Each structure stands twice: as C-alpha cells, then as structure tokens.
Amino acid sequence: MRLAFFLLCSLLAFFSAGVRADDADTLMKRYEGKVPGASLLVLKDGKPVLRKAYGYADLETGVAATPATNYRLASISKQFTAAAILLLAEDGKLKLSDSVRHWLPSLPASDANITIHHLLSHGSGLIDYEDLIPPGTTRQLDDGDVLRMLSAETRTYFPAGTSYRYSNSGYVLLGLIVERASGQRLPDFLRKRIFQPLHMDHTMLREPKGPQPTHRAYGYSEQDGHWLRTDQDLTSATRGDGGIYSSIDDLAKWDAALYDDRLLSDESRRLAFAAQNKVTGETDVDAYGYGWRIHGDVLWHSGESIGFRNVIVRWPKQGVTVMLLSNRNEPEPYGLAKEIGEAYLKP
C-alpha cells in the first residue's frame, strides 16, 4: 500500500513537472528556431527541474545555444562585484564605510562623503558615465576612462546617502577599489576568490585584450525583421558594472553558494540581501541591497547590454530560482522568468 502511494506521488510529481516544462516551452516559443536564443534553468531546492536551451548562440556559424553557452551577464555581474567587496571586508582589507576617495584619490573633493556602501546600494549620486562620453567617441571605454571622466566631474545628482539612482558609474569604481584593496587585477581576484572555489570553471570577466570566453553567445538586435550582430558597443569593455560571461550551469553553483557560508559569511549574505536603499517608482522593486533588487521575499537582478537580455529571479524561502540568459535585444525577460518560476512555488 505504501509502495503504491509512493509511486502515485512520484507519478503526479513527474506529470506536474512535465506540464510545467510544456508551459515553459510555450512561453519560450519566441526563442525557438534559427534566431538568437536563450538558456533557461529552474532550480528547486538546489536541483534543476527545468534545464533547456533554445535558438542559436551564433547565427553566422550555426552554433545552437546550450545550457553550457556563456552569455554576457551585463548588470548581473554587479552581484559578483559586490561579493568581491564583501570578501575584502571580511579579510579586513577595507571597510564599507570607507570614503571612495580613500581608494581613488583622483576623484574630486566633492565626492568625499561618498562611501563604498553608497556605491554598493546606488546611493552615491554619481553622474552616469554614459552621459559623460565625449561626442564622436569611437574607441571602447575602459575603467580608467570612466575614472578620468568622473574625476573631472564635480556635479552629482544628489548628496550621498539621500536618495537612490541606479549607477553603472558606482560599480565601475567598485571594481577599481577591489584591485586597489587586494593588489590583484579584478579578473584574477574574481577567478581566485569566487569562480574557482565554486567550480564555476567557464565563468570569466572578459577584457578585450584578455582571454575570451569559450562556448560564447554573440549578441543580436532585430532591425527591419532581420537579426544583426550587435555584440559590442562603446561601454562593453567596462568591467565591474557588467563584464562577466557565464552560463546557467555555472550560475547554478553561484545560486547554491547563496544559501550557506561556503563563500560569503552569514553576515555578508545578510548585508547583500538586506534593504540597503529604498527604491520608489520602479516595478517590482522595493529596495536595493548589494548587487540585488528586492521585492518582498523575492531577490532578483536583470542584465541588459547591446544584444543581451538576462535575468535571475530567486525565491529563497521557497528554494526556487529561475535564470534566463539570452543573446538578443528583446524581449526583456523578467516577466517571463517570473511567470515560469511562480509555477514551481507551490508543491
């Protein structure tokens, strides 16, 4: 009798998962065929319950997307930059209350009240570096260019700590601070302190003149009904704000590490997931932590750059995570990932 009951429960669970997978395929229909694709992963209690890829990673050479395809994470990279800062704080190499000018003294005196905490939580008020790019610029910007532009800029949007404004400028500076505090280059620190310990063997911070990602997806944009490769633009070479490449398989290992102290201490994870700065006027965002958007019990972050649209949505109390990485300029995948994930919240 007990065996029959167990088999019945197993069958129901299998059928339920199958229905959910079929529903996901329907929702992902736009990514199927010879078009720029996507990789999708749903984790439940640390185990993959849906792991699929759709479409193509490289249209020109006919390479299909797979779960091992590496996508440019864009702003999802910010959670790794934040983790690097938290690791250095655990090491005693820096304090979150440090002034950014302590580490980057070329910044103007008007930035003296901006702290590392303000950079992490988007409370710095720094001007967006994208708006400071000189007209006619054709060469890709690097982090040094961003620092030089910000060092010549005395304006801010608001006094530090008084408001919220999402800031790529702040996370570029955080990447530079990691280098100053650790004495290592940012790609090396991330590899040695995060990627290697978690066995994220195919994840890397890409630099134009450095090693290139394997199994790489190239970004595309749809124009007049045709897909054009739009993999890079002027800001694609900056690092701390969006330069990491990874796959859903490697990101599953990152997700697992966010539940325990194998990488970050309990206190560091508490800080990362705490409401550090209140957010108003944005859909499904109540506050920002350190590298994470917060909406009720949901932690999430999107990543958008030319030719890529990505998202990670986590329901940690229910043990559910959805990752959707894509190499196309549309659609924005947050709503889709949320809808897929919600199907797995109930037993």
Image (cartoon, rainbow, N blue to C red):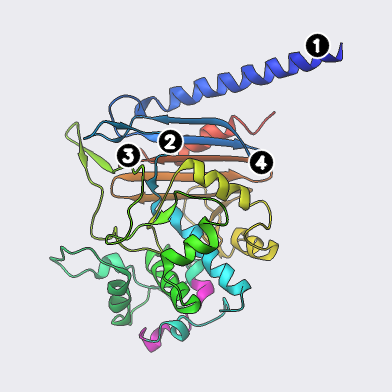
Quadrant of res 270: bottom right
Image height of 307 relative to 41, above or below: below
Q: Which residue is mark 2?
A: 39
Q: Is residue 159 left or right of residue 237?
A: right
Residue 4, numbered label: 1
Q: Which residue is mark 3?
A: 330
Image height of 287 relative to 35, above or below: below
Q: Which residue is mark 4?
A: 319
Q: Earlier in the sequence, mark 3 or mark 1?
A: 1
Q: Is residue 29 left or right of residue 275?
A: left
For image coordinates 34% across by 29% down, the residue present is 55
Does residue 162 appear in this view?
no
Q: Are marks 1 and 2 in contact (CB under 8 Å)?
A: no
Q: Which residues are magenta?
A: 106-118
Question: Which amino acid, mark 2?
Answer: Ser
Question: Which amino acid, mark 3?
Answer: Glu
Quadrant of res 15: top right
